[in-house]
Amino acid sequence: MHFVKNKWVHFLVIIILSALLLMIPDPIQNESMAIPRAQVEILSVNNDVLDPVGIVYNGAQDCIVRINEGEHKGKEIPAQNYMNAALDKDKLFKPGDKAICMIHDRETGISGTLVDHDRRAVMILLVALLFVMLTIFGGTSGVGASISLAFTAIVIWKLYIPLMLKGFPPVITAIGLIIVLGIVMCVLVAGANKRALTAILGGFGGTVVTILLGVLFTKLFMLDGGVLPYIVPLLSQSGMQFNMNELFLCTIFIGNAGAVIDLAMDIAAGCTEVITHAPDISARKLFMSGINIGRMDIGTMSNTLVMSYAGGFLSMLLYFSGQGTPVIDILNYRFVVAEIMVTLVGCFGLISAAPLTSFIAAKIMTGKPFLKE
């Protein structure tokens, strides 16, 4: 039993599972994926064939680059940076920049197509700093949180996305994803104990409420997956068939599941501390203690959700305000209503998770009848 409850055993198991998942090949293999990529350094640029279109450009930026890795390391080749008048995707290079480049090795010679700036080193640094901070301030729980974070990213990319691409039902698959990730997250952070079980059940209960309200209000607001980014190119891909409404629903409860589980863990941890110092406490009193803990979290975390979504759409709000768009118009645009609904439904999930988790904690941790003092 001690072996099963040992956190380091859990860490090792999840690390091994993560390594095995990383070995799974990507589900879609095409010509673009077969083209090797390498880091290059921009030596010179030629912007003569770029056509300015307002604040963006059309055309191609001709560059001379030096390959920094791979079998062609050290070679200087011509490379093109194609511009499509898309501010969110286009980039301009200057001499000295490091970039990711597709290497085309043809009979006529080697050339390249520039993908984007090489941000791997900064990304690794940022992730490493996060893991270090989690470990310093969280101890073994911080290590568990770091492993859980990595496992979540790997599972989504290597398991969940491929299953979706193969035609698995989006909602059912997403529910399975949340159950698996919720269990892993809680066990790695809290250990295999009543605290983790309470957080898992309470978090899942709050997520179920989010799903049910998402289904209801998606219909009442007459929304569908058309508000999702990249939905048009996704549906345009050959062989890709998705239920847009289900996909939209998945974005609602997957996006809020982490916050719901977070709240459930806070309440479960608080109730654990209460019963540790008052082992004879009744189920009803422990329930009320959980409610009191949850009240504080609900207020701050609901605001966190609102601020998070507002921050993500700050440019949109600035645009509408600058154009003098009437508030009544803004509040009825589909994509605005969708974000408001996602935020508020997520808040309902948080609110419902608090009493559910408190009730579960009272039953599991005390083992006493709820109606008796």
Image: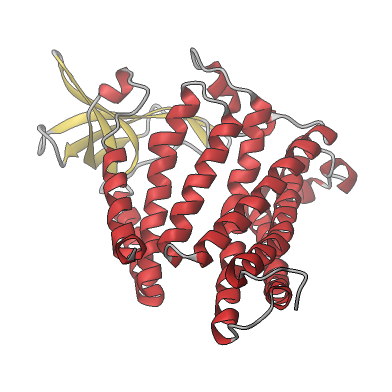
Q: Is residue 257 visible?
A: yes
Q: Is residue 279 left or right of residue 184?
A: right
User: How many numbered marks are there?
Assistant: 0
Residue at 43% across, 29% down: 162
What colouring style does the render use? secondary structure
**For this rendering, which residue is in front, 78 or 68?**
68
Q: Is residue 237 left or right of residue 147?
A: right
Which image quadrant is residue 200 in? bottom right
Residue at 58% across, 58% down: 261
- In the image, residue 348 sits, relative to residue 40, either above or below, namely below
The C terminus lies in which quarter of the figure?
Answer: bottom right
Q: x, y (%) of residue 363?
A: 65, 66
**For this rendering, which residue is in front, 78 or 239?**
239
**For this rendering, which residue is in front, 264 or 238?**
264
Q: Is residue 268 left or right of residue 346?
A: left
Residue at 66% across, 52% down: 205
The N terminus lies in which quarter of the figure?
Answer: bottom left
Q: x, y (%) of residue 25?
A: 29, 29
- In the image, residue 219 sits, relative to residue 337, either above or below, namely above
Residue at 35% across, 71% down: 140
Q: x, y (%) of residue 214?
A: 73, 41
**For this rendering, which residue is in front, 98 or 246?**
246
In the displayed image of the protein, which residue is found farthest to the bottom? 277
Q: Is residue 55 visible?
A: no
Q: x, y (%) of residue 147?
A: 36, 57
